[in-house]
Amino acid sequence: MKNLLIVFAFFTFTSSFGQEIKKDYYESGQLKSIRTLNKVTEIEKWEEYYYKSQKLKSIKYFKNAIAVGEWKVYFENGQLAEIGTFEKGKRVGECRRYYEDGQLKMIGKYKDNHREGEWKWYYQNGQIQKIKKYKNKQRVGEWKRYSENGQLKGIQKIEEKGEWKK
């Protein structure tokens, strides 16, 4: 009987106003995730996951089982950990990652699921850590590394086909 109750609690379905909602739970009974299917737009709100503390962990969207729209991931303290966008199942546009205190950790852009353009990483103190460049799925240009106090530590040059220049 106890197993039957756990199975029932694990797969709870409800329907209302053109939406189908599925909730999953941890063995302790705490909410683990919510999946919402809007039957009108066919956009599923999937992987709205929660930490055991019941703080929101992530929100991700799918349409016809393909990743779309803005995705967000959170630290357990509620701070945003990462934000990015998907189109037709591929990462596109700006992606940002953060430290747990909210300080920017990394920023870059995706094009067709690959890094594109200039990407920057930061130390937790806000100083630039490194800068890398990508074009047409290849590493390009000069990649720079900095010390935590902002001093240039080194430069690596990239050849035409993404190879390190010696």
Image (spheres, rainbow, N blue to C red):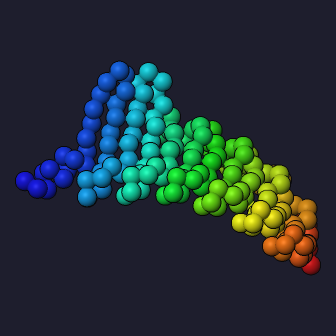
Image x and y of residue 102, in percent: 64, 56
Residue at the far bottom in the pictured view: 166
Please report the residue visible at 91 percent of the width from the left and 65 percent of the height from the top: 142
163 over 77 or under it: above or below: below
Q: Residue at x 25, y 58 (%)?
A: 28
Left or right: 12, with 115 as reference point: left
Q: Is residue 95 visible?
A: yes
Q: Quadrant of residue 3?
A: bottom left
Q: How many marks?
A: 0
The answer to whether residue 163 shows anywhere in this view is no
Residue appearing at x 69%, y 58% in the figure: 103
Closer to the camera in the image, 27 or 159? 27
- The vertical placement of 24 against 63, above or below, is below
Residue at 60% in and 61% down: 100
Residue 132 position in % (x across, y down): 82, 62
Q: Quadrant of the C terminus?
A: bottom right
Give coordinates of residue 18: x percent, y percent: 37, 22
Q: Is residue 40 above or below residue 79?
A: above
Residue nearest the viewer, comparing 71 with 140:
71
Location of residue 152 by image quarter: bottom right
Identity of the residue furthest to the left in this view: 1
Residue 72 vs residue 2: left or right?
right
**Relative to 57, residue 21 above or below:** above
Position of 11 with respect to 109 (left or right) is left
Q: Nearer the viewer, residue 57 or 14?
A: 57
